[in-house]
Image (cartoon, rainbow, N blue to C red):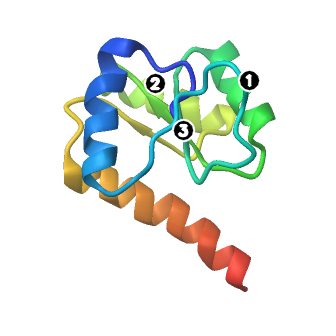
Amino acid sequence: MLFSVDPSLAGSLESVLTHCGCQVEPASGGMPERADIVFCPSARPLLRRALSLFPQTPVIVVSRLPEVDGWLDALEEGAADYCAPPFETIQIRWLLETHAGAKQSMAAA
C-alpha cells in the first residue's frame, strides 16, 4: 500500500512494485482491511499515522534522498526500512522478501 507517498515518487515505485507482481493500492479514502507492506513518506506525522493504522504491518519509508540520517530517524520512529529513488527491481524485491516474507514466516510459526 502507498500511504501518502508523493505522486512524483509513487508512479515509479508503483511501476516497480507492479513489475514485481504486487497489487498496489493507494491509501486514499477508505483503508483496506490489510496490507502486506505499507510505503509512506518520512515526515514524522505521516509515519506515525501509518504505524498506528497498521501496527502489525512493516512500514517502509520512501524518501526523495538516500540519507543515512533520514534512514536512522525512520528506524528510530519504528519504520521497518527505508528506500529512495531510483527504485530498482532488485531493491524492491529485497524489501518485499525481507519484510513481507518475514511476516509470513512469523505467521506460519
Residues at discs 1 and 3 in contact (Cβ within 8 Å): no
Q: Nearer the viewer, mark 1 or mark 3?
A: 3
Q: CA distance from mark 1 to mark 3?
A: 14 Å
- Check the picture and name the quadrant holding the C terminus: bottom right
Against 2, residue 60 (above or below) is: below
Image x and y of residue 50, in percent? 69, 30
Q: Is residue 82 left or right of residue 50?
A: left
Amino acid type assigned to the residue bearing label 2 in the image: Gly
Q: Which residue is mark 2?
A: 70
Q: Nearer the viewer, mark 1 or mark 2?
A: 1
Against 1, residue 50 (above or below) is: above
Residue 49 is labelled as 1
Q: CA distance from mark 2 to mark 3?
A: 21 Å
Q: CA distance from mark 1 to mark 2?
A: 18 Å
How many numbered circles does the render carry? 3
Of 22 and 60, nearer the camera is 22
Give the crowd class for mark 3: few <14, some 14-19, many >=20 residues within 10 Å.
many
Residues at discs 1 and 2 in contact (Cβ within 8 Å): no
Image x and y of residue 25, in percent? 52, 36
Q: Earlier in the sequence, mark 2 or mark 3?
A: 3
Of 83 and 39, nearer the camera is 39
Q: Earlier in the sequence, mark 1 or mark 3?
A: 3
Residue 1 is labelled as 3
Amino acid type assigned to the residue bearing label 1 in the image: Arg
Amino acid type assigned to the residue bearing label 3 in the image: Met
